[in-house]
Image (cartoon, grey):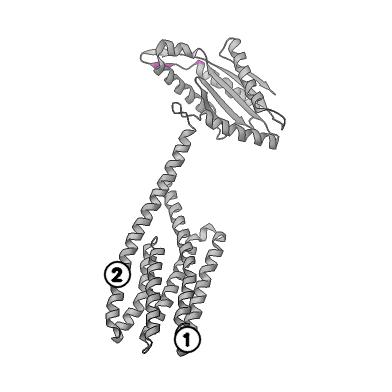
């Protein structure tokens, strides 16, 4: 439920960002279209008061839209929704101002050239806006209605340009259908992109896990170890490494089969998870029957106690497999180090390996530790 909610919030955030970008791109076209209508045929000089009000209103709203984009990264998270409403108000105000201008110009007689300019630019702006705002269907439909229908209703009420009224109405309905299709296509593409991103992350996560035990694999360890080593050098902290090996694991495979061996590997992985529970503990199946625990900035005596606890857990654990009771102990090499800039990671790993074999050579089922 939480994952779905977070995904929806991510998608909504993406939609808002896309709408802001699309809104900003339309600003220059409004200015160009307005200049063409007012000055190409001299309409400004024949209706100066309205022309100034039209230009002023359009400029103010476009300025607010530019400011909205400029300060998009400074909006607090708790005001993001209010920020979105501000965008909607700006866009709809822009379309309403243009729609009223469309009605005014089309209602003036003897303005054939300006009528043609206004009609062409209104149709173009409507089509562009509907496509741009399709991600939010309500905004696309509202934009379409406010930019086209004030002129359509005015012309119809006054009985002028009636063939044009019908054509504009048909065009507006077609734009609504285009909005519906654009909205459907946009959300389908956005959902597919979101799912692909989620699957990619999941595949990346799985590439760092051991498929049998669910612990991290050696590839993950190599990356994490490099990071923790650099952090320890920089902070003058220390790290601890435990290398754990199942005693006489080959005997389990040879006697009970590899399926039994796999079950025993899962069993020890569960025990490791049970003993080492800190979020910062890095638990790894290093290869075969070897397991590795990397612990940054842990108390050495406490970690030694955990290593001994793991050894005792395994000593007292029995795997019931196909009417067989399978037991095996573990040997552990434990090394702690506060690395300096001149120290080698390889030396640290080699020391853990030496301590593991020391525990093996001393009779197995024990922990051998050292501090460098």
Secondary structure beneath label 2: helix
Viewer-side label of 2, 1: 1
Residue, disc 1: 44
Res. 148 in view: yes
Give how far across and how far down residue 231 sits, in percent: 65, 36
Lateral position of residue 256 relative to residue 249, left or right: left
Image quarter in which the C terminus is found: top right
Q: Nearer the viewer, residue 269 or 33?
A: 33
Residue drawn 47% across and 13% down? 250
Give how far across and how far down residue 290 sits, in percent: 53, 21
Q: Crowdedness of circle 2 by 10 Å Cα count: few (<14), some, many (20+)? A: some
Lateral position of residue 241 relative to residue 86, left or right: right
Res. 1 in view: no
Secondary structure beneath label 1: helix
Residue drawn 56% across and 14% down? 365
Give how far across and how far down residue 25 sits, in percent: 48, 66
Which contiguous range is marked in magenta? 315-320
Lateral position of residue 355 relative to residue 53, left or right: right
Rendering quarter of residue 228: top right
Residue drawn 49% across and 24% down? 271
When the figure is inspected, residue 271 is found, relative to residue 104, above or below; the finding is above
- Tag shown at residue 16: none
Q: Is 318 part of what is drawn in magenta?
A: yes
Residue, disc 2: 173
Sooner in the amino-acid sequence: mark 2 or mark 1: 1
Q: Is 168 part of what is drawn in magenta?
A: no
């Amino acid at each position: 439920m939480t994952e779905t909610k977070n995904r929806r919030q991510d998608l909504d955030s993406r939609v808002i960002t896309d709408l802001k970008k699309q809104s900003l791109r339309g600003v220059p076209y409004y200015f160009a279209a307005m200049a063409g209508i007012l000055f190409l045929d001299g309409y400004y000089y024949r209706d100066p008061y309205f022309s100034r009000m039209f230009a002023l209103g359009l400029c103010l709203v476009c300025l607010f839209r530019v400011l909205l984009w400029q300060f998009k990264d400074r909006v607090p998270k708790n005001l993001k929704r209010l920020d979105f409403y501000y965008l909607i108000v700006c866009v709809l105000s822009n379309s309403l101002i243009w729609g009223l201008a469309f009605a005014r110009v089309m209602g003036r007689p003897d303005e054939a050239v300006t009528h043609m300019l206004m009609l062409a630019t209104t149709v173009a702006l409507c089509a562009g806006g509907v496509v741009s705002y399709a991600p939010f269907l309500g905004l696309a439909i509202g934009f379409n209605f406010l930019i086209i229908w004030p002129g359509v209703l005015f012309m119809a009420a006054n009985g002028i340009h009636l063939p044009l009224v019908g054509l504009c109405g048909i065009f507006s309905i077609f734009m609504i259908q285009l909005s519906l299709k654009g909205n459907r296509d946009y959300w389908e593409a956005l959902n597919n992109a979101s799912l692909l991103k989620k699957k990619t992350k999941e595949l990346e996560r799985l590439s760092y896990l051991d498929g049998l035990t669910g612990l991290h694999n050696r590839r993950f360890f190599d990356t994490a170890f490099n990071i923790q080593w650099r952090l320890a050098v920089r902070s003058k902290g220390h790290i601890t490494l435990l290398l754990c090996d199942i005693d006489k694991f080959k005997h389990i495979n040879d006697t009970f089969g590899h399926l039994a061996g796999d079950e025993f590997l899962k069993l020890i992985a569960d025990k490791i998870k049970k003993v080492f529970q800190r979020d910062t503990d890095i638990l790894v199946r290093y290869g075969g029957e070897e397991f590795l625990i990397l612990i940054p900035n842990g108390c050495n005596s406490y970690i030694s106690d955990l290593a001994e606890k793991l050894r005792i857990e395994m000593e007292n654990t029995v795997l019931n497999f196909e009417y067989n009771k399978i037991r095996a102990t573990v040997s552990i090499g434990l090394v702690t180090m506060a690395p300096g800039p001149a120290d080698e990671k390889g030396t640290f790993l080699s020391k853990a390996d030496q301590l593991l074999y020391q525990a093996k050579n001393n009779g197995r089922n024990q922990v051998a530790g050292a501090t460098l």
